[in-house]
Image (tube, rainbow, N blue to C red):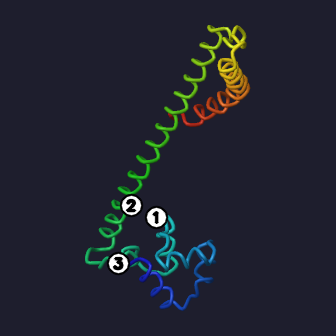
Amino acid sequence: MLNENLKALRKLKGLSQQELAAKLNVVRQTVSKWEQGLSVPDSVMLVSISEVLETPVSTLLGETVVETEPDALRAIGEKLEVINLQLARRKTTRRKILHGSLVALCAVIVAAFVMLFLLKSPYLGWDYSEPETAVLGVGLHALEWLFVRVAPIVLICAGIGIFMTRKNG
């Protein structure tokens, strides 16, 4: 509905996609995607479009305007507020999940380091006389060697991630 109304109103005003895009400070492809229904403008851009096309947002969205102007704007504002709240909740949830995952990753890395410290590198006392256990010992040594070199970098990156995803305020 929005895509059809946008295209019709743009043509009614005698504007090309390029001219509308210039007035909105976007590229022509953005206007094209809106008109094809491939994407939707955000609330701020929707208001800008309505101002450029000199038409109410409700007309762009396909609603018939029965209410008075202030009531229509309030209704649109309420709808946009609900959408913004939903997006904010989704963003907060994602941030919390990422933050918790990074904290858990740090805890696992620290626990692995403590375990390696307490075990005092078991591969050093490994019995390499039998081929099967020798291969296992070399494998464990390789894993520990890799872990000791990679884990600090991962720990630092996770710490930065924890700092960046912390709750602000």
**Residue 3, image x, y percentages:** 44, 79
Looking at the rendered structure, the kind of residue marked 3 is Gly
Q: Residue at x 36, y 74 (%)?
A: 58
Callout 1 secondary element:
helix
Judging depth in this view, the residue of 53 and 130 nearest the camera is 130
**Residue 12, image x, y percentages:** 48, 91
Residue 151 sits in which quadrant?
Answer: top right
Task: Please tell me which of labels 3 and 2 falls first in the chain.
Answer: 3
Judging depth in this view, the residue of 140 and 12 nearest the camera is 140
Q: Which residue is mark 3?
A: 62
On-image quarter of the N terminus: bottom left
Question: Is 6 placed left or right of 78 in the picture?
Answer: right
Q: Residues within 10 Å of mark 3 (few under 14, many from 20)?
A: some
Q: Which residue is mark 1?
A: 43
Task: Please tell me which of labels 1 and 2 falls first in the chain.
Answer: 1
Q: From this viewpoint, which residue is outermost toward the front?
A: 130
Q: Which residue is mark 2?
A: 80
Tell me if label 1 and label 2 are in contact, CB under 8 Å: yes
* CA separation in Å, label 1 and label 3: 15 Å
* CA separation in Å, label 3 and label 2: 15 Å
Q: Residues within 10 Å of mark 2 (few under 14, many from 20)?
A: some
Looking at the rendered structure, the kind of residue marked 2 is Leu
Callout 2 secondary element:
helix
**Residue 76, image x, y percentages:** 35, 66
**Residue 146, image x, y percentages:** 71, 27
